[in-house]
Image (spheres, rainbow, N blue to C red):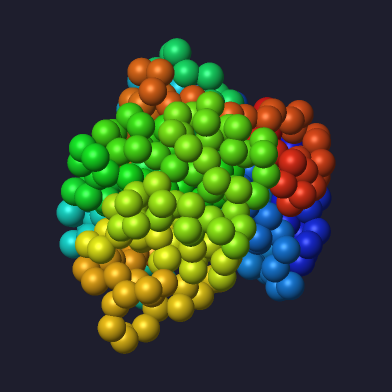
Amino acid sequence: MRAWQLTGPGTLELRTVPVPEPGPGEVLVRVGAAGICHSDSFVLGLPFALSPEPLTLGHEIAGTVEVTGPHVPVERVGERGVVYLCWSCGQCRACAAGHENVCHAAGRTAMPPCPGLGPPGGMADFVVVPARAFVPIGDDLDFAQAAPLADAALTSLHAVRGTLDRLGPGSTAVAIGIGGLGHVAVQVLRALTPARVLAVDLTDDKLALARDCGAAATFAAGADTAAAILAQTGGRGAEAVFDFVGTDDTARLAVSVVAPDGAYRMVGLGGGIPGIDAGPAGGPGLPWGATVRKSYAGTRSDLFAAVDLARSGHLTLAVDTFAFADAPAAFDLLDRGRVRGRAVLLP
């Protein structure tokens, strides 16, 4: 089969490799679509290899069960679905409580094995996955729409779900960065909460995408953005702020506009420092009662919910599709900010 593999730092190669065989409790999935995430680009740009062996990239995977391994009902052959990306142990307290994304077996890093970041991923014709990680999508959801549900929707929905107690009638939510995750978050906020949604980005096309997704108002990122958002909220700030970029500038903006007792959720991996200290609250600093949480991926329950939102028409992903052979061009466009929502490979 064909597979896009990381063969060395910064080196992505299309290689021919054997079709894998599913073991006990696993299924072989014929890939119907594979999303390309900024995490994939981050891994590709690392100055070191993640493993001594070539690594097949791709953790946003949709497809069809081709073969079942031992202890998996053969009736699952032909099932269409999307792959849950946190391959947790299923036995620890966190997993038992439905918090598979912070599985105890993953230690302090709290990042369970993920396809494309250890186990072989889905930028290939086939991939083997745990049967438990294969979530059905029915017959009515296109694979190009389904694949990004595995991360873009999962991660956004998990971040939003953790703030629902703040987002009642009359509340305001802010989404910073309207890319693959941010445009989904705007729709999830609209579907799950009565909050007014404000969106921030650098480019006009991303702000237009936010409005298409239901944002009530949009703001170009700049020196006056915080003041503009505070003016929209009577000076108090937003009950929830979601940063899908994570640079110094966006982290400080989030701290500046979150309301007292509000929720600031770090989602983007830009390495930004928000400038939070233990001094008295007030001014541009973090206000009293506000919480900060680094939100990683999501739970299987979150993925089921994302699939339900997509199937019911409440969630539509903006996707730019690429032929399988055009993966390098897709990565290049993603890195240059030229992908409107999510880049998706179609094998």
Residue at (25, 63) in percent of width and height: 260
In which quadrant of the rendered image does the C terminus lie?
top right
Q: Position of residue 17 (x, y in %)?
A: 72, 44
Q: Is residue 61 left or right of residue 325?
A: left
Q: Is residue 246 left or right of residue 326?
A: left
Residue at (65, 49) in percent of width and height: 202
Judging depth in this view, the residue of 76 and 194 nearest the camera is: 194
Residue at (63, 67) in percent of width and height: 50
Q: Position of residue 105 (x, y in %)?
A: 33, 67
Can you say whether 93 is above or below 273 in the image?
A: above
Judging depth in this view, the residue of 263 and 108 nearest the camera is: 263
In which quadrant of the rendered image does the N terminus lie?
top right
Residue at (78, 53) in percent of width and height: 12
Q: Is residue 326 left or right of residue 46?
A: right
Residue at the top extreme of this rendering? 140
- Residue 223, located in which quarter of the rendered image? bottom right
- Residue 47, located in which quarter of the rendered image? bottom right
Q: Position of residue 227 (x, y in %)?
A: 47, 58
Q: Is residue 90 visible?
A: no
Q: Position of residue 114 (x, y in %)?
A: 49, 54
Q: Is residue 337 visible?
A: yes
Can you say whether 246 is above or below 178 in the image?
A: below
Q: Is residue 105 left or right of residue 77?
A: left
